Image (cartoon, rainbow, N blue to C red):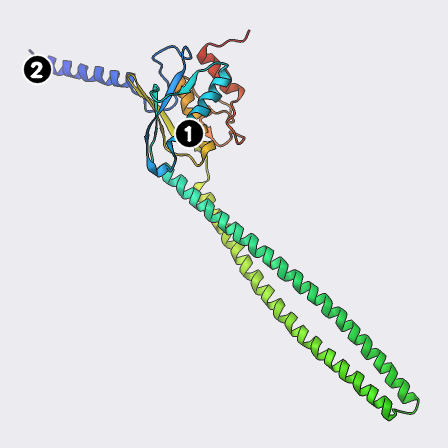
């Protein structure tokens, strides 16, 4: 056979092989493929490989798969998904750089929480110190005013005695007793004034330390925002298939609520739903605006599901 013809045939075979591979394999989470009519029978999901670094039990995963399947089924008004140990779609938990970043974020967030708790404790302690200082200051001022009144009355009494011709021996003894009492109270007030000065310095130093803690927390918040904030696409998971094999890979989640959201999104793709436009929808291509502590479907999610399942309103 002509060598040129042989090369042409080989090239055509490579093109056909490549076309067949593209036909049976997908690396995205937005296009879907069904071997049977969607919703004609429940699409079943089962657990596959679970990287132990996710620190999540098989029981928890099964619970989440059941919750999400039940939520989609309730939205459809019929059982369109369910968890099964030998289900059609395998759900794997693949630990990669995304989850490492999530774990780093959780650790950073816990560090911020510790800083916040420490600052709250210090602020409470500072309030208590300030309240004690204010109370002692008020008592000091009241006692100082009382002493000044005693001094004023004693001066008046001394003037009266001088006007009456001077002190007798008996009244001189009274004067000495009053003078001694006034000096004792004055010395005590001077000591208390020194203590108040020490307390004021301690409070000021404490406040400086507290302000430094607050500045440190603000720096951490800025670092957190620079490192972890930003638009989040649904890259936490993917839905893929090859021939009759179908699977979901979960790469990242920060808690059960987010895991339910990721699985609901990918399980929606598995049943045939594409992305919708509402940012609050489970099937929106971005994560972050889905509100509420529980999984909630928007009208757009439900309409897309009804379209796939061929459900029409009477």
Residue most extreme to the left = 1
Residue 304 left/right relative to 138: left
Q: Secondary structure at mark 2?
A: helix
Residue for point 81% across, 79% down: 151
Residue 120 seen in this snapshot: yes
- Given this view, does label 1 or label 2 mark the residue nearer the observer? 1
Percent across and percent down for residue 111 are 46, 49
Residue 96 seen in this snapshot: no
Q: CA distance from mark 1 to mark 2?
A: 50 Å
Residue for point 22% across, 14% down: 16
Residue to which mark 1 is pinned? 234
| 260 is higher (above) or lower (below) than 162 | above
Percent across and percent down for residue 147 are 78, 75
- Tag 1: Cα neighbours inside 10 Å, few (<14), some, or many (≥20)? some
Work out which quarter of the rendered image holds the C terminus and state it: top right
Residue for point 53% across, 22% down: 298
Residue to which mark 2 is pinned? 3
Q: Quadrant of residue 254?
A: top left
Of callouts 1 and 2, which one flags the residue occurring earlier in the amino acid sequence? Answer: 2
Residue for point 63% across, 58% down: 127
Residue most extreme to the right = 164
- Tag 2: Cα neighbours inside 10 Å, few (<14), some, or many (≥20)? few
Q: Secondary structure at mark 1?
A: loop
**Mark 1 vs 2: CB contact within 8 A:** no
Q: Quadrant of residue 185?
A: bottom right
Q: Quadrant of residue 272?
A: top left
């Amino acid at each position: 056979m002509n060598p040129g013809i042989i090369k042409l045939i080989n090239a055509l075979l490579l093109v056909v092989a490549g076309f067949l591979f593209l036909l049976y394999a997908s690396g995205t989470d937005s296009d879907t493929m069904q071997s049977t009519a969607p919703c004609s029978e429940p699409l079943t999901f089962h657990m596959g490989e679970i990287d132990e670094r996710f620190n999540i039990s098989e029981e928890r995963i099964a619970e989440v798969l059941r919750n999400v399947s039940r939520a989609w089924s309730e939205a459809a008004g019929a059982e369109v998904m369910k968890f099964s140990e030998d289900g059609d779609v395998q759900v794997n938990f693949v630990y990669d750089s995304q989850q490492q970043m999530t774990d780093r974020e959780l650790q950073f967030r816990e560090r911020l929480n510790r800083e916040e708790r420490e600052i709250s404790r210090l602020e409470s302690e500072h309030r208590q110190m300030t309240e004690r200082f204010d109370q002692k200051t008020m008592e000091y001022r009241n006692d100082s005013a009382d002493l000044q009144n005693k001094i004023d009355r004693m001066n008046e009494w001394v003037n009266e005695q001088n006007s009456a011709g001077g002190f007798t021996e008996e009244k001189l003894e009274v004067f000495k007793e009053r003078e001694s009492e006034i000096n004792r109270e004055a010395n005590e007030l001077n000591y208390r004034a020194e203590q108040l000065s020490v307390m004021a310095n301690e409070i000021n130093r404490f406040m400086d330390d507290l302000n430094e803690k607050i500045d440190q927390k603000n720096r951490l918040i800025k670092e957190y925002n620079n490192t972890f904030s930003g638009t989040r696409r649904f890259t936490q998971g993917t839905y893929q298939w090859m021939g009759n094999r179908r699977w979901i890979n979960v790469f990242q989640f920060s808690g059960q609520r987010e895991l339910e959201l990721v699985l609901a999104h990918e399980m929606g793709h598995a049943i045939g739903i594409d992305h919708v436009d509402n940012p609050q929808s489970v099937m929106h291509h971005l994560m972050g605006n889905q509100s509420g502590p529980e999984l909630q479907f928007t009208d757009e999610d439900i309409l897309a599901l009804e379209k796939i399942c061929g459900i029409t309103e009477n």
